[in-house]
Image (cartoon, grey):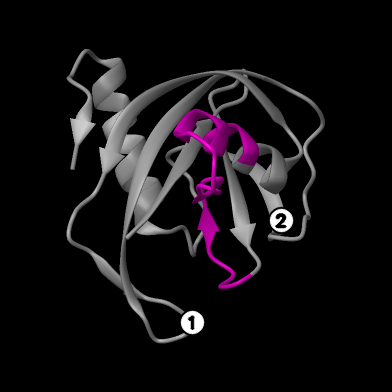
Amino acid sequence: MTVGARAVLRDPDGRVLLIRRSDNGRWALPAGTMELGQNLHECAVREVYEETGLTAHRITPFAIYSGGHVTVSAYGHPYQHVSLAVRVDEWSGDLLRETDETTDAAFHMPGALPDGTTHSVHAALADLARFEAGASFVLA
């Protein structure tokens, strides 16, 4: 089992920030696994900073994804990931388009996401829209 966080960060025009992962070339939300001694809030803020150069000042959790999807690590070990999804409500800084973990980062309109966007982005954006419309916190 691994535990982590993913973040939806939007600009004033409502565009969503996606990063292009250096390990698989797919577009995804800033996300990652907790480090020892961290809590989920700290994990979300750290991952946003590490992958984008932006500092998240205020976040709102809207979902926890813990479904039975099993992934195999690069070492051949199966694992299941539990992830807290948060909306970044306030942020600052200058966007870094390339980091140690990313090959690009850019804001995209939710209805015009680039080819190669992970399924988890679409699911998180749909769940966030329902949450913002008044639905309950998502436990999936």
* SS for callout 1: loop
Q: Is residue 10 magenta?
A: no
**N-terminal label among 2 and 1:** 1
How many numbered discs, if any?
A: 2
> Residue 55 is drawn in which quadrant?
top right
Residue 120 placement, left or right of 38: left
Q: Is residue 32 magenta?
A: yes
Q: Position of residue 54 (x, y in %)?
A: 72, 32
- In the image, the segment drawn in magenta is 23-46
Marks 2/1: CA–CA distance = 23 Å
Viewer-closest of 129 and 114: 129
**In front: label 2 or label 1:** 1
> Given the image, on which type of amino acid does mark 2 rest?
Asp
Residue 60 placement, left or right of 134: right
Which of the numbered marks, if any, corresponds to residue 104? Answer: 2
* SS for callout 2: strand
